[in-house]
Image (cartoon, helix red, strand yellow):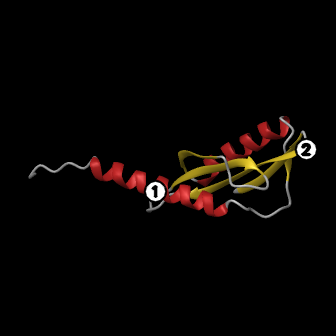
């Protein structure tokens, strides 16, 4: 199983690009997330989405494979080009980790307070 992919599709002379990657969430929780970025090939991504958390990399990778299969049915093809939006997806991972940290901190019980 792959932990990332880049797919493209040609339509009306424009190239649409989708990059997806599976990454572990911070901490030692064993949780993973799937991050996808989409947009026109020669510009910044117009959408970045995270899914999860998933319990372990294999669960996240199976979702990644299902997404790739569905996109292939819509005409997307594997691209040999390197990832161009990896910094955008890394920023989304930092945002997800920060959000998780705040939620975990807000849910703690403090009987003395």
Q: Secondary structure at mark 2?
A: loop
Residue at 83% across, 40% down: 72
Residue 17 lies, in percent from the top left, at 78, 49
- Name above or below for residue 52 compared with residue 84: above
- Indicate the quadrant containing the N terminus: top left, top right, bottom left or bottom right: bottom right
Residue 90 lies, in percent from the top left, at 58, 61
Residue at 72% across, 41% down: 67
**Residue furthest right as drawn:** 13
Q: Secondary structure at mark 1?
A: helix
Q: Residues within 10 Å of mark 1 (few under 14, many from 20)?
A: some
Of tags 2 and 1, which is closer to the observer? 2
- Which quadrant of the structure image shows residue 80? bottom right
Tell me if residue 1 can be seen: no
Q: Nearer the viewer, residue 51 or 12?
A: 12
Instruction: Identify the residue under disc 2.
Output: 13
Q: Which mark is residue 97?
A: 1
Q: Are marks 2 and 1 in contact (CB under 8 Å)?
A: no
Residue at 69% across, 57% down: 3
Residue at 67% across, 50% down: 37
Tell whether 95 sits left or right of 47: left
Tell whether 45 sits left or right of 12: left
Tell whether 82 sits left or right of 94: right
Residue 7 lies, in percent from the top left, at 80, 50
Residue 85 lies, in percent from the top left, at 68, 59
């Amino acid at each position: 199983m792959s932990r990332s992919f880049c797919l493209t599709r040609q339509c009306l002379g424009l190239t649409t690009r989708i990059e997806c990657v599976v990454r572990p969430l911070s901490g030692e929780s064993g949780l993973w997330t799937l991050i996808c970025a989409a947009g026109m090939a020669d510009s910044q991504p117009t959408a970045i989405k995270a899914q999860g958390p998933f319990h372990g990399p294999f669960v996240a990778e199976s979702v990644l494979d299902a997404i790739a299969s569905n996109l292939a049915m819509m005409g997307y093809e594997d691209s040999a080009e390197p990832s161009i939006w990896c910094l955008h997806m890394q920023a989304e991972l930092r945002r997800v980790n920060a959000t998780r940290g705040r939620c975990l901190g807000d849910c703690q019980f403090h009987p003395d307070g």
